[in-house]
Amino acid sequence: MKGVIFNAVEDAVVDLYSEDVWDDLLEAAQLDGHYTSLGNYDDADLSALVAAACPMTGHEPDELVRVLGRHAFPHLAGRYPELIADADSTHDFLRQVNDIIHPEVLKLHPDARPPAFDFEDRPDNVLRVTYRSERRLGALAEGLILGAGDRFNEHVEVTVVSGHGEAVTVFDVKATRLAPTGS
Ligand code: HEM
């Protein structure tokens, strides 16, 4: 996995906890933590960090990955400002991740392997999203989707329809626009 994902996860841990907690996690997971954005690192490092963080935070692994994904999103997006086109809703943005952002990531980093998504519009503001990746990181996708909802000021509910923790996971993503603050 690209170092930029580890960098965004580190930023999320520091936001939610502290620099010290990140250092403790690296120590507990026996990792040196020198992740450069362009480097490629073992996927097992991410699992080791999650395994170390669960007892420290009291979260179950999936919940922790969701929380970290949600808080990693603004940092990940901030590292590729030129890729964040002018989507105006979470659903539009998710389509852009698949059609524009991840393909652009692949041009910049030909050795990256971002996941693939399929989409289906459903009634009641629901976008059905099918995640495909041998990495089985659907929980990370869920967290990033929630983070995208925060960015677009929408209340987003993600329901797993099938394939929890599998290489193919189907989600229903229901998005509801929040009232502007101050009105
Ligand atoms: C600003 C927007 C985004 C950027 C720049 C971005 C970029 C990336 C990059 C660089 C990777 C690493 C790929 C690798 O190392 O092989 C990645 C992986 C991933 N991305 Fe995105 N991403 C973005 C948004 C999203 C969103 C909104 C989702 C959720 C739908 C998502 C889901 C994932 C997942 C789950 C992975 C982990 C790899 C896997 O599951 O196979 N990304 N992304």
Image (cartoon, grey):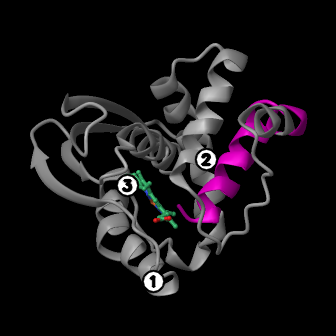
Q: Is residue 20 magenta?
A: yes
| Residue under numbered circle 2 | 45
Q: Marks 2 and 1, how far apart in space?
A: 21 Å
* Quadrant hosting ligand 1: bottom left
Q: Quadrant location of residue 103?
A: bottom left
Q: Which mark is residue 110?
A: 1
Q: Which residues are magenta?
A: 1-22
| Amino acid on which disc 2 is placed | Asp
Task: Tell which tag, 3 or 1, sits nearer the viewer.
Answer: 1
Rendered position, 111 above or below 30: below
Q: CA distance from mark 3 to mark 2?
A: 33 Å
- Which picture quadrant has residue 20? top right
Give, as a three-letter code, the residue at label 1: Pro
Image point 60% across, 28% down: which residue?
51
In the drawing, what numbered circle is on residue 89?
3
On the image, the x and y values in percent for residue 50 come to 60, 33
Tell which residue pokes out farthest to the bottom in this image: 107
Residue 5 point in image, percent of width and height? 59, 57
- Locate residue 131 relative to residue 103 in the image: left or right: left
Q: Secondary structure at mark 2?
A: helix
Which amino acid type is shown beneath numbered disc 3? Ser
* 37 vs 178: above or below: below
Q: Nearer the viewer, residue 112 or 119?
A: 112
Residue 60 x/y as whole percent: 52, 18
Which residue appears farthest toward the front when viewing the image? 30
- Of badges 3 and 2, the one in the foreground is 2
For the residues marked 3 and 1, what is the alpha-carbon distance in whole angstroms?
28 Å
